[in-house]
Image: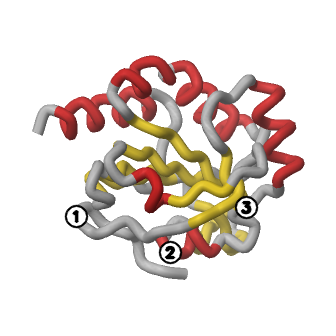
Amino acid sequence: MGDWVETGEKAPRFTLKSDAGEKVALKDLVGQIVVVYFYPKDDTPGCTKEACAFRDISKPLKDAGAVVLGLSPDDAESHQKFRDKYNLNFPLLIDTNHKVAEKYGAWREKNMYGKISLGIQRSTFLIDQEGKVAKVWKRVRVDGHEQKVLEAIEALKSK
């Protein structure tokens, strides 16, 4: 379990396969604003709500020049079903061994009804055009989160 990546730090690089079988490398996205969000599991209530919220603001995100990447430990088949079921319009990246989640600090000890386990802490990282972390949301509450991300992107663009 690593520490959280904080605002101002260089975003840890990664290359992962997407739900479409393509390799997505963070270094290839330099020059664009990137939203990297970690979520616990495909097709669960909170994760579905969050993914659909990002799906529904795809136009303003695209207009702002931002790319969304969703990461969870689920496999390709699970991601494909999730994507198809909800018409998700951004890549879901496969982090089955949670190595990238660990690099960002999103793989954490969780306490669910007194039972301690390791898992994804729902979190979002906004990465600027130079590859630096511009904003971090830890322990994300899904309701309204996508609007906060959009506002942060607009603020970043106006700098």
CA gap between label 3 and label 2 equals: 14 Å
Q: Please, what is the three-letter code of the amino acid marked with disc 2?
A: Lys
Give the side of residue 31 with respect to residue 39, left or right.
left
Task: Identify the residue position indicated by label 3 in the image.
Answer: 73
- Viewer-side residue, 122 vs 52: 52
Up-down relation of residue 112 to residue 135 (above or below): below
Left or right: 79 in relation to 49: right
Characterize the local packing of mark 1: few (<14), some (14-19) or many (20 or more) Cα atoms within 10 angstroms: some
**Toward which corner of the image does residue 35 lie, by quadrant?**
top left
Residue 106 pos. (x, y %): 52, 65
Q: Earlier in the sequence, mark 3 or mark 2?
A: 3
Give the structural element (helix, strand or loop) at label 3. Answer: loop
- Residue at position x 80%, y 36% from top? 82
Figure check: 126 above or below 97? above
Q: Nearer the viewer, residue 68 or 137?
A: 68
Measure the alpha-carbon separation of dots 1 and 2.
15 Å
- The residues tagged by marks 3 and 1 sit, at their Cα atoms, a distance apart of 26 Å
Kindly identify which residue carries mark 2.
103
Residue 8 — which label? 1
Q: Nearer the viewer, residue 88 or 44?
A: 88
Q: Amino acid at mark 1?
A: Gly
* Residue at 29% across, 50% down: 128
Position in image of residue 38 (x %, y %): 57, 54
Please tell me which residue lies in front, 105 or 129: 129
Marks 3 and 1, the one that precedes in the sequence: 1
| First reached walking from the N terminus: tag 1 or tag 2 | 1
